[in-house]
Image: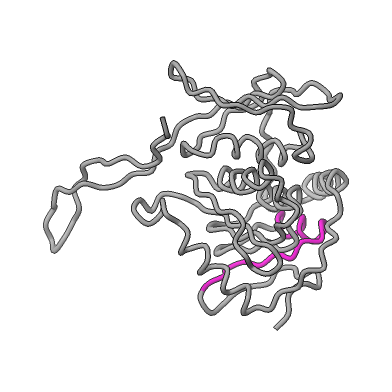
Amino acid sequence: MRPTPIISTTVHRLKNGEMTREEASVIVEEPLAILVDGVHYAVTMRTPGDDLALAAGFCLAEGLIDASDDIGSIQACDCEGKHEVSLARLGDRPEPQRRARHAVASSCGLRGRALIADMVKQIPPIESTTRMRVSEILSLGGHLRQSQELFVPTGGTHAVALFDASLTLLSIAEDVGRHNAFDKAVGRLLLDRNLSNAEIAMLSGRCNFEMAQKAARAGMAILASVSAPTQLAIDFAQSAGIALIGFVREETLTVYHDAGRVFV
C-alpha cells in the first residue's frame, strides 16, 4: 500500500472576524528506522514515501557508502507497525555504530574549524567547471516552487531540487525535514545511478553545516537556498570549493562564496 503523505483534519479559521469550521490538509510525520548491515544505525522523523531513496541518500551523506556500487541490497519493511529500511553494503567495511548526532555551534570557533578540516579530508574534491549567471540562479527558485506538490495544500514541507549543468531538473523531494528532503533527492539519483550528472542543489529553507556537508558528499558544485546560510556552512563551502548562494528570491540573491562559478 502506498504511504499517505497528507491527511485531512478539522480546523477553525478566523475569517472576517468569525471562526469558521473547515477541513485542512496536514503533512504526515512518522519515524523511520535505518538499519545498516543489520545494525540499527539511526531513526529519523520523515514524511512517508521514498523511504529507499531517503535511506540511500542518508547513508551516502554519513559516509557509510560512497557510490551506488557499494549497495548490496536495500529493502523496506512496513509491517506490524514497523517502518524501517535495511541496507546491506558490499565490500569489507567497518561495522556501523549507532549514530550519535553531534551539534556544533554556528559561531564556529576552533572546534568548528577543526571539524570542517576533518570533514573536507573525507570528501572527494569537487572538480566541476560549471559556472552560472545570476539570472540562471534566480530561475532555480521558480523551478523549486512549481514542483512542490505537497507544500501547496499543506504548507508543511521543505524541498530540495537537484539540477544538472544545463539546469535540467533531475530530482526533487519534499519532506517535513530539510535533511530528509536532501537525502531523498540525492538517494533517488543514487539508486538510479544518475547522481554524477547532478551539480546544483536548490533548498527551500536555510542552509546549515549539515546541508552543506550533504551537498559536498553528493558532489554538488553549487548550493543555493531561498533563506540564509549559517557561518559554519559558509566556512565549509569555502573549504570544500562549493559556490554558496542564499536568499534566492524572484529578483535578489546573496553570494556568500562563489568558488569562481557565479557571474553576472
Q: Quadrant of the N terminus?
A: top left
Residue 170 is one of the magenta-drawn residues? no
Q: Is residue 253 above or below residue 44?
A: below
Q: Is residue 187 left or right of residue 65?
A: left
Of residues 258 and 163, the one drawn nearer to the viewer in this rendering: 163
Of residues 104 and 71, the one drawn nearer to the viewer in this rendering: 71
Q: Residue 138: x percent and y percent?
A: 58, 74
Q: How is the image coloured?
A: one colour
Q: How many marks?
A: 0
Q: In the rendered structure, which segment of residues is drawn in magenta? A: 232-249
Q: Residue 236: x percent and y percent?
A: 77, 55
Q: Is residue 202 above or below residue 210?
A: below
Q: Residue 67: x percent and y percent?
A: 78, 41
Q: Residue furthest left?
A: 18
Q: Quadrant of the C terminus?
A: bottom right
> Measuring 86% from the left and 24% from the top, which residue is drawn there?
92
Of residues 57 and 177, the one drawn nearer to the viewer in this rendering: 57
> Measuring 66% from the left and 44% from the top, which residue is drawn there?
192
The quadrant where residue 87 appears? top right
Q: Is residue 162 left or right of residue 123?
A: left
Of residues 103 and 43, the one drawn nearer to the viewer in this rendering: 43
Q: Residue furthest bottom?
A: 264
Residue 244 is one of the magenta-drawn residues? yes
Q: Residue 6: x percent and y percent?
A: 36, 42
Q: Is residue 233 above or below residue 29?
A: below
Q: Is residue 201 above or below residue 181?
A: below
> Measuring 52% from the left and 66% from the top, which residue is drawn there?
143
